[in-house]
Image (cartoon, grey):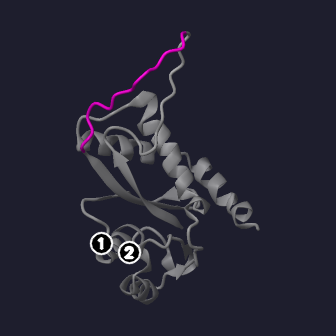
Amino acid sequence: MFSDEKKWNMDGADGYRQWIYTRVKQSVTIHQHFGGGSVMIWGGFCGDRNTILDFLDCRVTSVKYMATLQNHVQPAFDIGTQIFQHDNAAPHAARHTKTWLKYQGFDVLTWPACSPDLNPIENVWGYMSRHVYANGRQFHSIQELKNAIQQVWNQIPASYLLTLVSSMPKRVQL
């Protein structure tokens, strides 16, 4: 299972650029109209199935992270037969989290430091960003943003997830 957190902004993705082509060479400025709000989520997938998203209402701590795994991974996936992946973010690498994961029976994949692009969930976040923020879309409320995120998450094709899983051998080749 591949998992991670992602921050979503009401006024567009972090580092998101919108290209505008004009016939006349001119400077074009895009204004972000709403701003001021963001949503943090946790999600994961295994094979062709994704988890239920967890909309995180606070900063992710070790305690919050363990609650997310308990509520969203354990009920839906057979922990003892699958390898669990997460990066080396502080809440994931905390001693308390590692002890809890071991006690719960998680088989955790050792993850190299400073390698976020190795995780296929990053491709899922990119796919979702293109759909959530299509045509430079911005959001008027946190709930509107949450609804858009949830809708795209629910519509991710199973075939796309399987393609990402099958890409792992090439990702880890030296």
Residue drawn at the location 31% of the way across and 73% of the way down: 61
* N-terminal-most mark, 1 or 2: 1
Residues drawn in magenta: 24-36
- Residue beneath the point at 40% across and 74% down: 90
Q: From the image, tell me which residue sits under label 2.
A: 91
- Work out whether residue 52 can be spotted: no
166 lies above or below 152: below
Q: Picture coordinates of residue 160 (x, y %)?
A: 60, 48
Q: Nearer the viewer, mark 1 or mark 2?
A: 2
Vertically, is 167 above or below 8?
below
Does dot 2 land on a helix, a strand or a loop? Answer: helix
CB under 8 Å between discs 1 and 2: yes
**Majority secondary structure of magenta residues:** loop
Q: Amino acid at mark 1?
A: Lys
| Image spot of residue 88 (x, y percent) | 49, 73
At x 29% / y 48%, what residue is drawn? 38
